[in-house]
Every structure is written in C-alpha cells, then in structure tokens.
Image (cartoon, coloured by chain):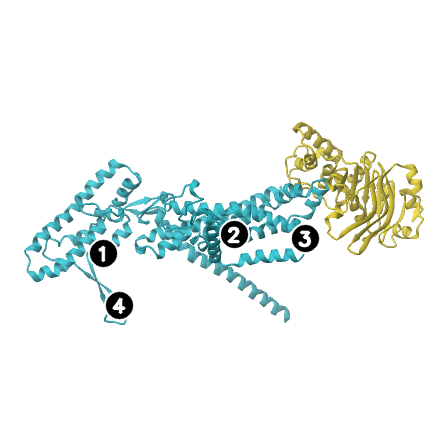
Chain colours: A cyan, B yellow
Amino acid sequence: MQLIMRKWLDRLFSFSAYSAIGLIIFVLVLVIGPIFVKGLGAYLFQGTIDNRRMMLNQFNRGDEGTLEVEWMEVKQERKSIYDMFSAFEKELDNMSATQRKTLKPVYKNIKEAVAVLIGPEPGAQLPALPRRIYGQTRWDRAQLKAKDVLFEETWDYSGAEGKKVLTPRAPLFKGTALEPLFPKIEKNLSQLMRPRLTFYPQFLTDKAIDAHFFGGIGAEVAGTIYLALGAMLIAVPLGVIAAIYFKEYAKEGPTLSFLRTCVNTLAGVPSVVFGLFGLAFFINTLHVSPGKSVLAGALTLALLVLPTVIRASEEAIAAVPHTYKEAALSLGAGKWRTILTVILPAALPGILTGIVISMGRAAGETAPIIFTAAVSVGPLVMPSEVFTTPTPALSWNLYNICTEHEAVEEIRHVQYGMAATLVLIVLTLNALAIVIRAKVSRKLKG
Amino acid sequence: MSMNASALSEQFHTHIETKAFSVFYGAQEAVKRVDMKIPQGQVTAIIGPSGCGKSTFLRAINRMNDLIPTCRAEGELLVDGLNVYDRGIDASVLRRRVGMVFQKPNPFPKTIYDNVAYGPRLHHSYAKRELDALVEESLKGAALWDEVKDRLNKNALGLSGGQAQRLCLARALAVNPEILLMDEPTSALDPKATARIEELIVQLKGRYTIAIVTHNMQQAARVSDVTAFFYEGLLVEFDVTSQIFTRPKEKRTEDYITGRFG
C-alpha cells in the first residue's frame, strides 16, 4: 500500500518537474520566438525603390547605373499621378463652391498621403528631414501608407468607446480627373514602389539616419560592446583577486563573514541604485569624466557584476582538489606560485563561465547606464573617446525608441531588430560560456 | 620505548632526528614527545593503527602540517642537524630537500612532461635540452619512462592509478631531494601496481632517505630496513625491521603485528 503511494508521489514529482521545465521552454519560445521572427525583418525585408535610392545617397551602396534605369521607369509611373493632380486642380477651379468645399480638404489629405507614400514631387524643394525626402522604403510600410491615400479615416464616438471608421475616398471623386488615382494606387502599387527582397546585414553596423528612420544600429552595438568589455576589464581582475583572497588568504572569522555579507548584499542591490550610485560617485564625486561617459558606465556595470564574478571564481577555486595544492607545495612552490601555476589554471573553466555570463548581464543592463553612460542619439564612439564621451547602447536605446521616439509606429522594425540583436548577443555569450567550459574541462581531463 | 636506538645510530648515519617532538591539533596532542633518529639512505617504515599519529609525524618532516591552521609543533625536528621549525627556515626551501608522495596519486591536470618539469621550473630556469634530460632521468628513476615516452605531451590525468603514482614519484625525484616521504603510497593501488612501487622503493634506497607510512605490515617487512611503531601518538618501538617483526620487545607491538588490534 505504502509502496503504491510512494510510487504515485514519485510520479507526481516527476510530472511537476517536467511541467516546470516545459513551461520555461514554452515561455522562452513564446517570448524569444516572435522577437527573432520580427527582428529578422530589420535584416531581411521587401525593400522599395526608395530604399535603394536612400542607400545610394546616404551610404553610397548599390549600383548607380541600374538604379538610374529603374528610377526612370518608376518616375514615369509616378508622373501620371502628378499629372492627375494638376488636371484635378484645374477642375477644382471650375467647380461649384459647395463641391469645391467638400473635395478640397480631402484632396489636400490625399496629396499629403501620396507625398508620404512616394516622396515629394520631383523638382520640388527637398525637405530637411531625410524621412521626407524619400517615399516608403519598406514594402510593408508602403502597403499601410497606401491605405491612407485610399481611405478617409474618421472616428465614431456614438458607442461607449471611439471606433475607427475607414471610408473609401474613390466614390467621392467619381467623374473627376482624380478617379484613376485610386485603382492605380490599389492595384499598381508594386509598379510604383518596386519591392524587392533586400538583405541588409549592415543593419548591425550602419549608423542611424534621422533618428532611426533609416540606417542601422552600429553606434548602439558598439556602445554595448564597449560597456560590456570595459566592465569586464575592471571587474575580472578585481573579482578574481578578491576570490583568491577569500579562499586562500583570509582567515575564518568575523571580518571574513562581514566581507562575505557585503558581497552578497551587493549582489541583491537593484540595478537602478547602482546607476544612481555611479552618477553620484564616479561622475559627481570622483569626476572620472566631465559628464556621462563609457568609462563611468563601465565602472558602474563592473560594480554590478563584481559579486557574480567573485562568487563564480570562489566556487571554481573551491572546486580545485586540495591534492593539487598539496602536491605543488610539497615540490617547494610558494603560496603565490601555487595559486598562479596550479590553482588558477584548474579553476579557469569555472572562472571563465562566470566571466562570460557576467558579460551577458553587463550587455543587457539598462538602469545602471541611464545615468552614467547612455545617450538616446549619438554618433559612433571611437575607442579613443571612451573616457569622455557617452554612447548609445542597445539596452537603453531599445527602451528609448520604443517609448520616447516621436514616431514609434514607423520604426517597429528597428525596435524588433534591436531587441533581437541584443538577445542574440547575450545568447551568443552564454553559448560561448558553455563551449569554453566544455573545451577547457576536456583539456584538463586529458 | 625500547631503546635500540643507540645501536641503530651506531649502525647508520642519522639523517632526521627528533627530540621531544610533539604535534598538536588545537589542544589535542597527536604526536607525543617523540625521540627518533631516521637513518640516512635507509627505508624507515612507520606503522601503527589508524589515528596513531604516524601520518601527522611524517607530514611534520616537510611541514605539510602548516596547511592546517590549528596545527602546531613543539620540540625539535632536525634534518641534517638543522631544526626545520626554526624561524629562519623557509618551508619551500625545506620541501625541495624533502620530497613527498601522497596517499592518492595526485598528478596536476597538465601534460606528463609538465608534471615532471613543474618542480625544476620552480627553482631554476633550465635550457630546453637540460630540462628534457632531467624529465627523462626522473621518469626512468620512477620506472615510467618506457610507458610514457611517446606521450609526454598527453594529459597526466589519462594515466592509470599505478602509473599516476609513479609519475608523482618522478615529479618528486625531479627536484632532486635527499629525503622522500611516502604517505601510504600504495593504499589506492592494485596488488600489481603496489609491487612495482615496492620494487622502486628498494631501488631508490641508498640514494634517498625514505620514510614510508603504511598500513600493510607485509609491505613494511618487505621494503623497510628499520621500523617505527606508533601507538596513540607515542613512539612505542623503533628498531631494525627484522627485530620488530620477529622479536618485538613491547607487548603492544607484538599485539599489533600479530593482528590482535589495529
């Protein structure tokens, strides 16, 4: 009887363990899957002729000759739209006052929507913002913007909540010179935009143009790398030395347990507190830089990951068999020599794992760098400038362009692209940790 | 304590001498006022039941007990007339002269070559050729050369237990010590590997003063010239091995070697 009971309890336990793991995997797929799928859209998408023109003008990329040929064709296609506009404007002058009053504002909206879709009329004075110089560069955005031409958007507040109502504009312009515009935009949009599958790997390294409307995330990627590497450069020597002190030199006692408590408490401090501390201490007190800088951010991140590095190194050192130490000492090695030549090499896999995982953490942290290193918009920082210059970074700019950007909707692809890139960087670092660990352990085991 | 010690010291030159030597773990006295003269170039076996202080005594000779924070020594332990517990003595200099082989084979997770070269590299900078020769000589000394000469650059953790223990012996020999301490060197090995180590001990005798702690009384009888019997921290009897095993003077020695306790 008891045996059956125990068997069932055992099964129940296994079941809950499996379901916990299953849940984790499910959530992981649910969260990371869409990010990757949508993030891929920043690198691989249907680019329009305007994308290719923008690329040629801004980055000097692509073949000028073939583009010119295609652009001539498209210009011809688009010219008919402008012809319709001028014909309609003439008609408008001859209309009755009431008809003119209804059609003129709608026509104005249509003209604006067309300018958003295919860019300003050739020959017109070019706007200052790059986003207004070109039409829609992405086919998915172009299809959305075409709807703004075809439909009048109104809001119906008769119910409890406002409802968006889309009314087609075509019937309104029946019999006018503008009538052919609507079927043209609806059916021949691809003739106007020429979508083509575009692979844009340079998204990772290109500078952003006009607040991420065009271009890539090069400055953010570089900033993240600077910050993560810088934090490691500071945290690793300190952390490993601290771990050696804890494990090999410190004598058990109240001082040691106090120090340990300090390290463990440090690990539990919210990251935003580290950010504020970094601002107050490194920038305002120590004046390591005139204002926010990569250096100040790296110092703050180093503090944040220090407990992790110390703990991982301590555990790795503790796991080195005592017999190695005895053997080295019995051969006449001093303490420091023993640590350098026997203990640290044997502890290396564990230490490296801790380092790489901390690096992933440093790359992904946002709060500590808001006050110490990050700017929303900034150029690519050169290695020589890291001591004085703040930098954009993936984690902070992702938040920024998702919430504080003036046109959040327009740059969804950049947001997802940035998120996917950040997740990919962190995952790659973690995978690297596993590989290093396996490789070094194999080397140690022979 | 049976005092055949005077006869022993007449017969052999003394290499290690203890005078009222005690070792404490905190308040507990693990080795109690031991007077003993370990002869040069001979094999001295240290036997006794578990917890009798024989390992502690052995580890006191190269000051390995320093690793244990609560451990301290009293009295004198002289190697070539010099007290190793004097303030001016550097433990790492002492340990170069007093090599040690441990209970469990403990090669470093390095190549076979680097294991043997570890000690020499600590103390001198050798030319590659010199070091190669030294490694070969040490491995030959430990009767391991023929088995590993083609895989010197393979990791030492791939060796069998017996080979690993001989590697540890070679590693100790490479520093060119005068004294070899062996702390139950064959307790983790199978009978065949044990026999090889025992052969080695007999071969190495003469060049090195060897002190071996063992639980195996046949082993003590086979390899040692003199035997010390420890019981509860005291040196009960110290005599030529054949004497101890055939005509022990003390009742406790007799009881132990005939298997009445221990």
Q: Secondary structure at mark 4?
A: loop
Whether residue B166 is visible to the viewer of this picture, yes or no, is yes
Dot 4 crowding, Cα within 10 Å, few <14, some 14–19, many 20+: few
Q: Nearer the viewer, residue B234 or B198?
A: B234
**Residue beneath the point at 21% across and 38% down:** A69
CA separation in Å, label 1 and label 2:
52 Å
Whether residue A428 is visible to the viewer of this picture, yes or no, is no
Dot 3 crowding, Cα within 10 Å, few <14, some 14–19, many 20+: few
Residue A421 in the image: state x and y as whole percent: 41, 49
Query: Mark 1 or mark 3: which is in front?
Result: 3
**Residue beneath the point at 91% across and 39% down:** B9
Residue type at tag 3: Lys
Dot 1 crowding, Cα within 10 Å, few <14, some 14–19, many 20+: some
CA separation in Å, label 4 and label 2:
50 Å
Residue type at tag 1: Lys
Sequence order check, earlier mark of 1 and 2: 1
Q: Secondary structure at mark 1?
A: helix
**Numbered label attached to residue A251:** 3
Does the CB distance between marks 1 and 3 fall below 8 Å? Answer: no
Residue type at tag 2: Leu
Residue B7 in the image: state x and y as whole percent: 94, 40
- Position of A126 with respect to B100 (left or right) is left
Please identify the quadrant where the N terminus of chain A is shown.
bottom right
Does the CB distance between marks 3 and 4 fall below 8 Å? Answer: no
Q: According to the image, label 4 marks what residue?
A: A162
Query: Mark 1 or mark 2: which is in front?
Result: 2
Q: According to the image, label 1 marks what residue?
A: A147
Sequence order check, earlier mark of 3 and 2: 3
Q: According to the image, label 2 marks what residue?
A: A303
**Figure check: A122 above or below A408:** above
Residue type at tag 4: Gly
Sequence order check, earlier mark of 1 and 3: 1
